[in-house]
Structure formats: C-alpha cells, structure tokens
C-alpha cells in the first residue's frame, strides 16, 4: 500500500494493520511520513508540547541479567564499577535539590539479588518523607517481575506493597523488543514479553498508570518493531493504562553489541513517526532527548512527538553506553527547545495534568539572507 | 518531471518518490506556486515571507524536490575541509537554513552542511531538506581529531585505520539517508 493510501486510511480514522506499519517503516519519503505523523499529532495536541521537572536516580547497577545492549549493569556487587547506594545516599540526591525540587523521581535499577525487599520499600518511604507530594515513578516491569520471583510474591503483592510505601506509577523501561527471536538473543534471562505486558496489565487493573518503551536500532527488523507496537496497542485496547510510548535508540558503546552501528537520526525520526501513526490509542509519544540528543528530539516534535520528557538532572544508563548529551537539561532549556520548534511548552505532572502553560512567543525574525557567491556555487547565509 | 504527477508519471518514476501527502503539505502552505515559479526561472524574492513562515516539513519537501530536480542524488563529502559558505547552525535552525538556501539559491547550487559544527545526526537529516554536500573533520565520537596512524582491530578485517572506519561511517550515514556519497 502506498503512503497516499495509508494516509487516506489514517485520515479516515481506520486502524493501521501490521503490513501497513511495515510499509511506513519502508517509506522512502521521510518528510511525507513525518508530515502525516505531524497531522495526527496536531489533531490530538495542537502545538502543545509537554515536559516535566523530574530527576533520575539509579540506586544500583548490580544486575543478574546480562543483556547484550547494556553498558550500565555489573554482574556482582564489588565488581569494578559496581555501585549500590545506601538509602541515605539516594535520599541525599533529593535533599540536595530541595531549593528547586523535582515533581517526579524516576528510579530504574539493576536486578540486584542481594538486597532485601524492604530496601525498596524504605527507599520510597524516605523520598516521600522528604517531599510528600513528589511523584515516584519507579521500577520497570522487568524489576517488578524480578521482585515477584526473587521474593516469592505475586505481581499484585509486589505492586501493593510498593504502592503502600509510596510508588505512584511505573516507567516503561525493559520492553526492549518483544519478539522472541530478538528478545531471546539480546536479553534472554529476564522477564519475557508476556511477563512484561502482564506486569503492566496488573498495574493498570490496580489503577496505576504506566509508560512503555521500545529499544530499536540493533539486530531487530522493521517487522519486529511493528510486532512490538502491535502488542502494546493490544494491551492498551484492553486496559487504557499506558500514558506514553517512548522509542529508545540503541547506543553501542561498552556493551555486548559494540560492533553494531547506532541508529541514525533519520531512523530516530522515522521510528517516532511510525509510532505515532500505529499507536492510535496511546495519547503521548515521547522524544526522549537523552536517547536521541536534544537537537534530534527537537526535530521529532515536528515528526509526531509531543513530549520531551524532562530535566532528568543526572542520567547514567545511556551515558554508560556512550551518550554524548548532557546528563540533564535546565528547565529553561526545555522551554527554549520547544519554542524554537514552534510549539507551546506545557510543564506537566506525571499524569499530564498542566502545571504551567508557557505563553507562545514570537521567535525573533530570521534575518537569514542568501546570496550567491561570485566564485563557485556555494551559498553564504548571513544572519 | 513535475512534483505534482499524474498516476502514470508517478508509476514511471518508481511509484513512491512523490506522494500526495507531500503535495497536500505544499498546497496547504502555498508552496506549489513557489515550485512552479522556480521552474520558470522567476525571481523568488516575492515569496520570501511565505517561505519563512511555512511549516518546516513543507518547506523541506519543497527544497528536497528542487534538490532532486537540480542537483540529483549525489552528496559530495569534503573531509577535513570546510568549503566557504558551508552552513553551520544547529537543530531546526539548520534545517530551515538549508531549505531556504536550496529554494532561494541559484539553480543547482551546492548546499553544504558542516557536520563538525552541526553534528552528524542533524547533518544527515539536512540531506532531506535540500543539502547536497557535507563537510567536516574526521573525528572520534567526542569530536577529537583522529591521528593518521591510529588503528583498531576489527573482527574479520584485522587492524584497520580508525580514519578509514570513521570515513566509512560518514558515507554510511549518507547511504542510509537514501543518497549517494561522492568523495
């Protein structure tokens, strides 16, 4: 099916099929694909573009799983580069920022076999003691699955206990690629796709909201990506509990797939656009600036994305894999990035309630002039 | 061949290079008229305001259509040199600069992006907005120069010069944008 036919389908509100998703990934006209995704994005959100004031904390990188794409995890406590925070050290990360505190704390960790479950409960309680209204978006579905197996509980028990200690929602990490042909090869010793989805299903049934991700640009095919999106779409049809989808670009430095090239910016934009078109029942598509870099994330706001994530403050997982972007962005930087994209910055809370709507401002008149140089055919642009 | 093609023309062109989605975007922004004026060799200064106010993707589609007709698929890659006039802004600003340079510049002009200043990622995206050349240093991921004699062991290939690897990475970026690199 051609893009024109797919566009007609999208505009008619018809759901895209598996083959349609693959065709979109194969579409050579990236700008036309982006324009179509942008149409859908603007129909849903207009120019509104979301971000939040959040903070990342990774309390331990000790992990029993040996995912090929991971540069963050260390297999054993005490191995070179391994670290596990004392609870006081973790809480100190928030205490140090109480003059301008985050609204959300996003915690993702390795699967540490030696910590008691009470460590995680106390971790949450401590943050809530310091700032009772802070939103705790913590522990991927893979971690929840690990807790259930390791401590002998059901998913419901784990989530109930963590919620009682302060957990508010789940982040989307750990999804990688669902298809077993890929998942088995890159992360075969952690939660399966069905287990990942079941944790989200249970969380949604309990009234919690969650996000979902997809790690792309390694050994998977376009068919695997579409399969991944389809599984998430089916879950969302059932539960309506996913808030945002976040495509994550594979970074090759320092991990078991270091000989693979990283996905390019064109692939980043294509993946954002196709995600927006296929996931017709997920409200928000996030351009995670740590993954793609702020420049590409900004461009993605014209290719279907409506959210830039947040200030982050101190990201370490992508940086272990060679990310060259800052570990955090200032609040004003996010506002500027969004405005430069011609969008309206909306500071949100985790549930996408509006905290502050920044007024639209006219961008400075572009004084770009193009003039032909006398010699050669190169052009000079003078601002 | 025109941007707005009949089904027969579209089929002859390989079917998918132009789409009605692009045409809709150009039509909505009033840019099909600009394209016609460009083909007729008219002075485009009268359209400057419209171009500056246009949606970025529509402007990019116009610039890309002009690039296709006038400059073809080749991307001239200038390594370790910076031709005068190479564009070096960042992010969205670069994309708009590139597109305007293509649309307002002379027919068949070389529109060159300095990836050393703009970043390779954005430079690759700019190839879809009318750019026809890239320039910049052969550097590592942190932007530091690579020595001539630096080598790296590559499985199945033995010791390979790092500069050659980096050069190949740049050429691959061009190919993955659907274009043909020319050194």
Image: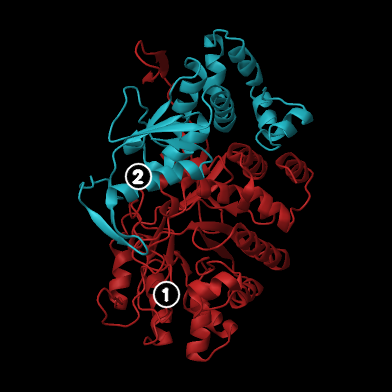
Chain colours: A red, B cyan
Within the image, what quadrant is residue B152 found in? bottom left
* Label 1: element kind: helix
Q: Position of residue A1 (x, y in %)?
A: 75, 46
Within the image, what quadrant is residue B4 found in? top right
Chain letter belonging to callout 1: A
- Quadrant of the snapshot with the C terminus of chain A: top left
Residue A280 located left or right of residue B87: right
Q: Position of residue A205 (x, y in %)?
A: 66, 74
Question: Which of the two discs, 2 and 1, sits closer to the camera?
Answer: 2
Q: Residue at x 50, y 57 (%)?
A: A217
Task: Residue B39: give its label.
Answer: none
Residue A334 can be seen, yes or no: no
- How far is the residue under mark 2 from the one under mark 1? 49 Å
- Tag 2 residue: B167
Q: Residue at x 55, y 20 (%)?
A: B51
Residue B39 located left or right of residue A56: right
Q: Residues within 10 Å of mark 1 (few under 14, many from 20)?
A: many
Vertical comparison of A95 with A164: above or below:
above
Within the image, what quadrant is residue A380 found in? top left
* Label 2: element kind: helix
Vertical comparison of B86 with A80: above or below:
above
Q: Nearer the viewer, residue A23 or B34?
A: A23
Q: Nearer the viewer, residue A144 or A320?
A: A320
- Tag 1 residue: A124
Residue B57 can be seen, yes or no: yes
Q: Nearer the viewer, residue A268 or B16?
A: B16
Chain letter belonging to callout 2: B
Q: Position of residue A144 (x, y in %)?
A: 51, 78
């Amino acid at each position: 099916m051609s893009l024109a036919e797919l566009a007609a389908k999208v505009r008619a509100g018809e759901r895209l099929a598996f083959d349609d998703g693959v065709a979109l990934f194969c579409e050579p006209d990236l700008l036309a694909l982006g324009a179509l995704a942008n149409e859908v994005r603007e129909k849903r959100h207009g120019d509104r573009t979301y971000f939040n004031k959040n903070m990342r904390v990774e309390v331990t990188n000790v992990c029993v799983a040996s995912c090929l794409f991971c540069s963050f995890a260390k297999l054993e406590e005490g191995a070179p580069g391994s670290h596990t925070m004392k609870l006081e050290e973790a809480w100190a990360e928030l205490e140090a920022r109480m003059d301008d505190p985050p609204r959300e704390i996003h915690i993702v960790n390795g699967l540490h076999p030696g910590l008691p479950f009470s460590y995680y409960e106390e971790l949450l309680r401590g943050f809530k003691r310091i700032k009772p209204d802070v939103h705790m978006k913590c522990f991927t579905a893979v971690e929840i699955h690990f807790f259930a197996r390791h401590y002998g509980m059901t998913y419901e028990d784990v989530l109930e206990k963590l919620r009682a200690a302060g957990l508010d929602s789940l982040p989307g990490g750990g999804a990688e690629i669902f298809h077993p042909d890929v998942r088995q090869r890159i992360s075969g010793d952690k939660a399966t796709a069905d287990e990942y989805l079941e944790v989200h299903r249970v969380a949604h049934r309990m009234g919690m909201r969650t996000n979902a991700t997809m790690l792309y640009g390694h050994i998977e095919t376009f068919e695997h990506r579409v399969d991944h999106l389809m599984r998430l779409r089916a879950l969302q049809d059932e539960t309506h509990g996913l808030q945002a989808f976040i495509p994550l670009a594979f970074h090759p430095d320092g991990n078991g797939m270091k000989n693979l090239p990283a996905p390019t910016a064109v692939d980043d934009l294509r993946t954002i656009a196709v995600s927006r078109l296929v996931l017709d029942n997920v409200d928000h598509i996030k351009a995670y600036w740590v993954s793609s870099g702020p420049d590409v994330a900004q461009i993605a706001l014209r290719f279907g994305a409506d959210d830039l994530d947040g200030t982050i403050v101190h990201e370490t997982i992508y940086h272990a894999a060679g990310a060259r972007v800052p570990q955090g962005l200032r609040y004003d930087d996010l506002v500027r990035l969004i405005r430069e994209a011609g969008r309206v910055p909306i500071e949100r809370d985790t549930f996408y309630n509006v905290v502050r709507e920044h007024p639209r401002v006219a961008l400075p008149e572009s004084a770009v002039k193009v003039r032909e140089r006398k010699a050669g055919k190169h052009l000079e642009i003078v601002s | 061949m025109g941007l707005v093609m009949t089904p027969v023309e579209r089929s002859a062109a390989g079917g998918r290079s132009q789409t009605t989605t692009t045409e809709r975007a150009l039509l909505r922004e009033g840019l099909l008229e600009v394209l016609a004026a460009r083909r007729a060799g008219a002075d485009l200064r009268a359209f400057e305001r419209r171009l500056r106010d246009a949606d970025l993707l529509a402007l990019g589609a116009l610039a890309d259509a002009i690039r296709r007709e006038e400059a073809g698929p080749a991307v001239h890659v200038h390594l370790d040199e910076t031709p005068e006039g190479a564009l070096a802004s960042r992010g969205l600003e670069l994309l708009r600069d590139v597109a305007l340079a293509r649309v307002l510049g002379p027919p068949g002009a070389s529109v060159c992006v300095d990836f050393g200043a703009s970043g390779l990622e954005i430079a690759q995206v700019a190839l879809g907005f009318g750019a026809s050349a890239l320039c910049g240093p052969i550097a590592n991921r942190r932007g530091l120069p690579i020595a001539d004699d630096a080598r790296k062991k590559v499985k199945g290939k033995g010791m390979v010069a790092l500069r050659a690897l980096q050069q190949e990475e740049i050429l691959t970026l061009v190919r993955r944008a659907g274009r043909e690199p020319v050194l």
